[in-house]
């Protein structure tokens, strides 16, 4: 029964909490603190503060922790599934609609408009990362990392995860 309660405690806020993590936090608090009494207001506040300090979506971090505290590893897994399930179901539904009407002239126009928009957004993001690394690390560090990354990825075909890990290690040792 506890696993069903964990599922409901995170699935319902995911459905009615339109707007993502910040919109679902009060709904999760209502379920976790007031309805099921798994933690106090103070404990929830501390968890929220810690969750905000860590990278990534706040609702999934909180779900994983609360689920683990209440139901162990299985509880954590159920809470995480319940948190992402509403978005996952919406995506599957919307993609099935998109697939059904893929030959529609309106859908084709939408696709034609969306592709360059995404390309521009990715370009702006890359420029901002480039400029931020130039300002924060200096031109020589940035050039070294860019060339090393390019060679590792393109010439020696190193997996991107290893290149990222190497860049993080380099940053921790030489730029920290």
Image (cartoon, helix red, strand yellow):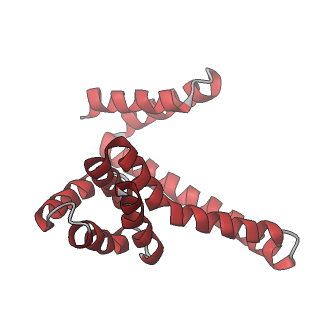
Residue drawn at x 32%, y 74% is 27
Q: From the viewer's perspective, is 36 left or right of 77?
A: left
Quarter where residue 157 is shown: top right
The image shows residue 13 at horizontal and vertical percentages of 40, 71
Q: How many marks?
A: 0
Quarter of the C terminus within the rendering: top left
50 or 123: nearer the viewer: 50
**94 lies above or below 82:** below
16 or 6: nearer the viewer: 6
Which residue reaches farthest top?
A: 156
83 or 2: nearer the viewer: 2
The image shows residue 78 at horizontal and vertical percentages of 43, 52
Which residue reaches farthest front?
A: 1
Residue drawn at x 64%, y 67% is 117
Quarter where residue 74 is shown: top left
**96 lies above or below 77:** below
Residue drawn at x 33%, y 48% is 135
Residue drawn at x 35%, y 27% is 170
Q: From the viewer's perspective, is 105 left or right of 118?
A: right
Which residue reaches farthest left?
A: 42
The image shows residue 171 at horizontal and vertical percentages of 32, 32
Quarter of the N terminus within the rendering: bottom left
């Amino acid at each position: 029964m506890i696993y069903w309660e964990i599922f409901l405690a995170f699935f319902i806020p995911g459905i009615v909490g339109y707007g993502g993590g910040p919109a679902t936090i009060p709904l999760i608090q209502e379920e976790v603190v007031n309805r099921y009494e798994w933690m106090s207001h103070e404990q929830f506040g501390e968890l929220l503060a810690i969750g905000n300090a860590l990278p990534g979506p706040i609702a999934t971090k909180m779900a994983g922790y609360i689920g683990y505290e209440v139901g162990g590893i299985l509880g954590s897994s159920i809470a995480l599934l319940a948190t992402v399930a509403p978005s996952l179901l919406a995506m599957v539904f919307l993609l099935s609609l998109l697939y059904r009407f893929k030959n529609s002239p309106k859908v084709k126009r939408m696709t034609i408009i969306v592709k360059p928009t995404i390309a521009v957004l990715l370009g702006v993001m890359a420029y901002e990362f480039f400029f931020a690394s130039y300002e924060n690390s200096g031109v020589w560090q940035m050039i070294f990392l860019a060339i090393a990354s390019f060679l590792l990825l393109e010439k020696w075909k190193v997996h991107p995860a290893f290149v990222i890990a190497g860049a993080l290690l380099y940053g921790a040792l030489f730029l920290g």
